[in-house]
Image (cartoon, rainbow, N blue to C red):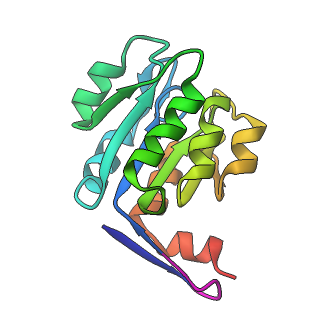
Amino acid sequence: MLKISLPGRGQTLELENLLLDQNGTITCDGVLLPGVSQRVKALSEKLKIYLLTADTFGSAAKIAEELEIELFRVSPEQGGEDKRDFVQTLEPAKTAAIGNGYNDHMMLGEAALGIAVLGREGCSTLALKRSDIVVSNIEDALDLLLNPLRIVATLRA
């Protein structure tokens, strides 16, 4: 578990789950981005981590196996609803989510902590609006969770 107290807001995040979008978030063109693997492995000591994807490039199973995380495939047509529904099965108040696409906006909004990544594949403006924090790359997103005082500095009142 990752416990993060947000001063001035009367809120403490008690995170147990992390949902990761694949395309444009932890991969570019279906290839895992550098620095992701070691960060995910470090976070897996504190959080249960899931990969949620429509698997556009067909590399999800290999990536999930390499990262040693659970894979949840979503519909290419209704992936946004699938991701939102998955958050609801886990207990949203204990879940963080990282994504970049239009099909991530409901997941980002439903999770206790939503982080949008504005990477090389871009970011949906709706994903930006529904997130709590926006970063420029996945390394920074994962580092927020590895260094929770960065989240405190960004989200304190």
Q: Quadrant of residue 65?
A: top left
- Give the residue drawn at x 56%, y 76%: 152
- Give the residue drawn at x 40%, y 46%: 89
- Horizontal side of 53 relative to 154 (left or right) equals left
Q: Nearer the viewer, residue 101 or 135?
A: 101
| Residue 9 forms part of the magenta stretch | yes
Q: Quadrant of residue 107?
A: top right
- Horizontal side of 53 relative to 103 (left or right) equals left
| Residue 148 forms part of the magenta stretch | no
Is the C terminus in the top left, top right, bottom left or bottom right quadrant?
bottom right
- Give the residue drawn at x 41%, y 56%: 91
Q: Which secondary structure type mostly characterizes the magenta part of the structure? A: loop
Q: Position of residue 1 (x, y in %)?
A: 30, 67
Q: Is residue 24 visible?
A: no
Q: Nearer the viewer, residue 31 or 73?
A: 73
Q: Is residue 37 visible?
A: yes
Q: Position of residue 42 (x, y in %)?
A: 27, 55
Q: Position of residue 88 (x, y in %)?
A: 47, 47
- Horizontal side of 101 relative to 57 (left or right) equals right
- Horizontal side of 108 relative to 142 (left or right) equals right
Part of the protein shown in magenta? 7-12
Q: Indicate whether 18 appears above or below 154.
A: above
Q: Position of residue 90 (x, y in %)?
A: 38, 50
Q: Indicate whether 97 appears above or below 68.
A: below
- How many numbered marks are there? 0
